[in-house]
Image (cartoon, rainbow, N blue to C red):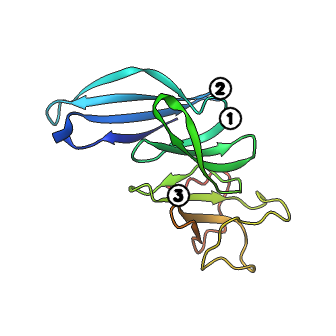
Amino acid sequence: YPSAGILRAAPSDGPIVYRVLTSWTEAVVYRDYEVSGPEGSPRVRPLGTPQPACRGLQVSLPIIMPDGRALAGRDERTGTTKLFALAAGGACTERLDLGVPTTKVAFDPEGRRLAFAVPPRALRDGVAWPYTGANLSAAEPLYGVFVFDIEGRYISRVPGSDDARRLTIPE
């Protein structure tokens, strides 16, 4: 499945450039595309060849950030969902670890927040959230749909989301 980000959106700076991220069981790959031409009949041109992303890491369920410069996915070595900066050439640098296993994530349009689900029984006994939030209490279940503020490191649980499952995609 692909996800796309926009590296350059202002036509005054030249054609729009999209970054499309695709993953298979073996690897995560991205490719940039230039889109130009009049509205209604755009021309799409690949910029270079497909590039591996996050070499040496095992990342599943990756989704690219709206600006195309970062991605979030499950690190299969730790079993937790992480956010990675995506550098030129495909190198990935870990920006944060949510500390828990989640479903596929979704970014807000500005790339400042992540939404994701934690299905019932996904967390082992004794596993605690590494982040806090005003509407998370010890009495609440540690599953459901959540919104995470990346910069503030703040998490909120979406009320009424107790029925989240493994295939819940919070988009």
Residue 58: give its label: 1
Mark 1 or 2: in front is 1
| Residue nearer the viewer, 161 or 24 | 24
Give the distance between the C-alpha atoms of the residues marked 1 and 3, in whole angstroms: 20 Å
Q: Earlier in the sequence, mark 1 or mark 2?
A: 2
SS assignment at label 3: strand
- Please state if 125 lies on the left or on the right of 2 as rendered: right
SS assignment at label 1: loop
Residue 26: give its label: 2
Question: Is the C-beta separation of discs 1 and 3 under 8 Å?
Answer: no
Residue assigned mark 3: 114
Give the distance between the C-alpha atoms of the residues marked 1 and 2, in whole angstroms: 8 Å
Residue depicted at x 29% and y 29%:
34
Q: Name which residue type carries label 1.
A: Gln
Is 131 above or below relative to 4? below
SS assignment at label 2: loop
Is 3 above or below relative to 129? above
Q: Name which residue type carries label 3.
A: Leu
Question: Is the C-beta separation of discs 2 and 3 under 8 Å?
Answer: no
Q: Name which residue type carries label 2.
A: Glu
- Please state if 77 lies on the left or on the right of 14 as rendered: right
Residue depicted at x 44% and y 57%:
108
Q: Position of residue 11 (x, y in %)?
A: 19, 40
Q: Earlier in the sequence, mark 2 or mark 3?
A: 2
- Please state if 43 lies on the left or on the right of 156 as rendered: left
Q: Earlier in the sequence, mark 1 or mark 3?
A: 1
Give the distance between the C-alpha atoms of the residues marked 2 and 3, in whole angstroms: 25 Å
Quarter-of-image position of residue 58: top right
